[in-house]
Image (cartoon, rainbow, N blue to C red):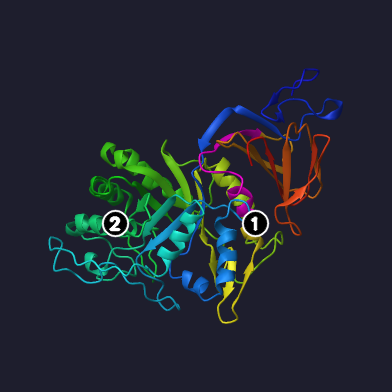
Amino acid sequence: MLRGVVAVTLLGFTAVNPAPHGDPPAVTVREHIRHQEIDGFGLSQAFRRNELLEALTPAQQREILDLWFHPRKGAGLSILRLGIGSSPAGSPYDHMVSHQPEDPGGPDARPRYVWDGDDNSQVWVAKEAQRYGVKRFYANAWSAPGYMKDNGDDKNGGTLKPEWAEAYARYLVAYADFYKKEGIRITDLAFTNEPDYTAVYASMRFTPEQAAAFVKVLGPIARGMNVVCCDSFGWDEARAYTRAIEADPEARRWVKVHTGHTYASPVDGPLPTNRKVWMSEWNPNGTTWNENWDDGSGYDGMTIAQAVHDAMTLGRANAYVYWFGASRGATRALMQIDDAAGTYRVAKRFWALAAYGRFIRPGAVRVDATSPNPALKVSAFRNRDGSTVVEVINTGTEPVTWHGVRGRATAYLTDSTHDLARTPITGGSVTLQPRALTTIVTGGHR
């Protein structure tokens, strides 16, 4: 770090040497160094989890919807992932009606689609999300109907019969068309979920080469939507699917968003593409409902904050989509609903995601942010309204003072006892509390 130079301020944040005694700043933001555009942050309520929400009172439903989608009261989430297909066998959510439940008589027969306007309450939640300003609706199929597959079952893996490829593509587009009639535009369409994992619930296998071949069938039929692939169950595993698509010029033409989950392997670097990349599903493993912020369990709030940070920085992800917004029992969802008691609870995991989703809006650009302190995990984003958001996770056990925050700025603290609570910025300095996430917002219209 240069010493004895005049500090340079870049859109509210001092870039060099603002600390007393010539020490380097705790955080340096260089807004002229731009990285990826942000599509948003989101969640899913697939597998009939919305029925839990419907069991609550209208007032409680509104409270949860506000927490998920309200840009000032809650997390301001901007992506809703919808499930096309079936639910886990043996669960209370064992049945989800397909919009083409029976074999029409062969792949060339005229399909007999069925639509109830509800889609296991996903339509209701999508309409509510849209009222809050959500514009990205990501529809994802776990499996083709069983009669299209070589195992005759929508569960237990199996593969798509080649002769059914075009019929399956039209089946997916028909789903989007039904949503269009309900006033919801499906913006992003995926034909597979975890194609490298066989589950006892709805699942279907694709090799990377098979996936690349199928997108060439789906792409011309799904015009007007982003074709998404391939939601592998691990980030490292997703690279094989991305490489296969990138190696095929026709497949590369159609796939607009590359996706991966982080169950089998975490985000440790970018996927091999220049297209958009989403971390499209994850919740941590665990055996209990846990509301804690920082307990070392691996499914507390600090875990989620660091996972989002790694996806945005190491993975250069354009979006982060958590798994369930709410579920029941020993869930690692953001919220737990006890439908029998008519109550719900919010985990600190929710506030970790909210610290990013509320302030980093769709269309923001990640800009360069660094710290000489290895305990600080730092990321920064420039919104379209001119505001700059700096997210700092202090993984250490001691507070750190960041000197040199200039201009109109507000800081928010999330830790064991605070949920995006305003925290002082005094004389251009903010204290980054230990084992905490501090969000600093400057400029703009917010």
Location of residue 432 by image quarter? top right
The span picked out in magenta is 352-369
Is 360 in the magenta? Answer: yes
Query: Disc 1 residue type?
Result: Trp
Asked whether disc 1 touches disc 2, contact meaning CB atoms under 8 Å apart, the reply is no
- Judged from this view, the residue extending furthest toward the top is 5
Spatial separation of the CA atoms under disc 1 and disc 2: 35 Å
Would residue 201 appear left or right of 44 to someone viewing this image?
left
Instruction: Give the label on residue 177, or none.
Output: 2
Is 58 in the magenta? Answer: no
Residue 286 visible in the snapshot:
no
> Dot 2, how many residues are within 10 Å of its Cα: few (below 14), some (14-19), or many (20+)?
some
> Dot 1, how many residues are within 10 Å of its Cα: few (below 14), some (14-19), or many (20+)?
many
- Judged from this view, the residue extending furthest toward the right is 21
Would residue 395 appear left or right of 224 to someone viewing this image?
right
Instruction: Give the label on residue 175, or none.
Output: none
User: Which one is nearer the viewer's eye here, 366 or 398?
Assistant: 366
Q: Is residue 10 above or below residue 41?
A: above
Q: Which residue is mark 1?
A: 351
Question: Where does residue 38 sit, x and y in percent of width and height?
Answer: 51, 41
User: Which one is nearer the viewer's eye here, 321 or 156?
Assistant: 321
Query: Disc 2 residue type?
Result: Asp
Count of numbered marks: 2
Image quadrant holding the N terminus, namely: top right
Q: Is residue 29 above or below residue 38?
A: above
Picture residue at 41% right of the left edge, 38% below the top: 275
Question: Where does residue 414 sit, x and y in percent of width and height?
Answer: 71, 53
Would residue 11 appear left or right of 158 to someone viewing this image?
right
